[in-house]
Amino acid sequence: MRVKMLIATVDTEYAGLISDYISEHHTDIIEVSVCSTSECLKNTVSKRKYDVALIDTKLIEDTDTSLIHLPMLLWSEHDKSIKTTIELSKIHKHQRISKIAAAVLEEYAKVSGSRFGSDKRSANITAVWSPAGGVGKTTVALAYAASCASEEKEVFYLNLETFSSIPGYFRENNKSISTVFEMLENPEGNVKMLIQGTCCRESGITYLCSPDNYDDMCILSAGNVKELVTSCAQLTDELVIDLSCLCDFRTRQVFDIADKVLIVTGPTSSSTAKLAQFISQNNVFESIREKAILVANKGAVISENAAGALISLPLVQSNSTEEIYKALSENSFKS
């Protein structure tokens, strides 16, 4: 079900720009209509219920905002002070249209009153984890994501590391994932819709930007993680989850949900020793053994593989993280 959105402004060129952007980037979740006169606006809102309306200052005084679920005021510093009978959320005109669309979806997600949409499509979920740091776990996760994208699948990369690797791999240009974390605590909010409005896309991979601070990731409950993963899985074909090296309750929650777990190890004796400890001493491994695939990264050689399936990846020499994961994506990740 799409959000019915009305753009009401006398600036027809501006309305056209917003409408065209939404039609190109958000047509799956937003159905947009446009009005440019008071008469048109009155007739339109009286005949049809709108979920969201962006109304500029020249038309707001003649609008019955009670007929609109979420009326929002389009304004700029040049507009005169406008008095309204209710306090309206405001959207600044002069900013990137992508920011406007994201802000609208964020505000509507807060009041839509639905945790999940009617679309229950669920992705194949792959968790990427390692008991050791420095083995190239994130590079492997993104290489796998890029490999799926090359097969023309919709791919979502979700970074749940304690310290996010997102800034080292992507150009973040939208709101932080912390915005989504806040929505997880709102019983009236729509997490899935907010994710759609705040996610970014590069090289065929959709992702959420890094948290505002360290604590935002650390305070997530197992229930928060489950809802976040479930919501992301409804938006894509392949969901790739990059986890911290800890084997805590959040990691175990993702292991439970995942269809496949890639366990990454490197060529050092330290990473080999930690992997051996995880396999032999941690009962979590037994719960995921059937869906675990060992990934020997950076040219690592594995003599014994308790996980069964094994993927061997070469050492790629480059200072560019993007070049490395794209080169690795050319290898087969099929078990």
Image (cartoon, helix red, strand yellow):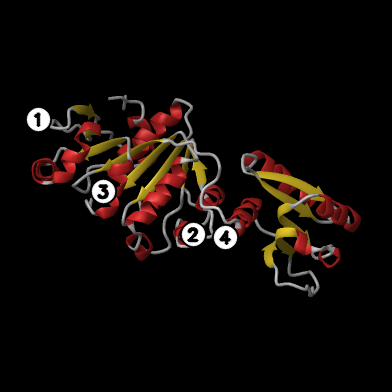
Q: Disc number at residue 76?
A: none
In 3D space, how far apart are the residues under numbered discs 1 and 3 (Cα atoms)? 24 Å
Residue tagged by mark 2? 183
Contact check, label 2 and label 3, Cβ < 8 Å = no
For the residue carrying disc 3, how many other residues have a C-alpha within 10 Å: few (<14), some (14-19), or many (20+)?
A: some
Does 285 sit left or right of 4 as displayed?
left
Residue tagged by mark 1? 304
Nearer-N-terminus badge (2/3):
2
In 3D space, how far apart are the residues under numbered discs 2 and 3 (Cα atoms)? 23 Å
Residue 20 drawn above or below residue 43: above
Q: Position of residue 155 (x, y in %)?
A: 45, 36
Contact check, label 1 and label 3, Cβ < 8 Å = no
Contact check, label 3 and label 4, Cβ < 8 Å = no
Residue 71 drawn above or below residue 313: below
Nearer-N-terminus badge (2/1):
2
Q: Disc number at residue 252?
A: 3
Disc 4 marks a residue whose amino acid type is: Lys
Please tell me in which quadrant of the rendered image residue 270 appears. top left
Nearer-N-terminus badge (3/4):
4
Residue tagged by mark 4? 110
Q: Secondary structure at mark 4?
A: helix
For the residue carrying disc 2, how many other residues have a C-alpha within 10 Å: few (<14), some (14-19), or many (20+)?
A: many
Disc 3 marks a residue whose amino acid type is: Arg
Contact check, label 4 and label 2, Cβ < 8 Å = yes
Q: Secondary structure at mark 3?
A: helix
Nearer-N-terminus badge (1/3):
3
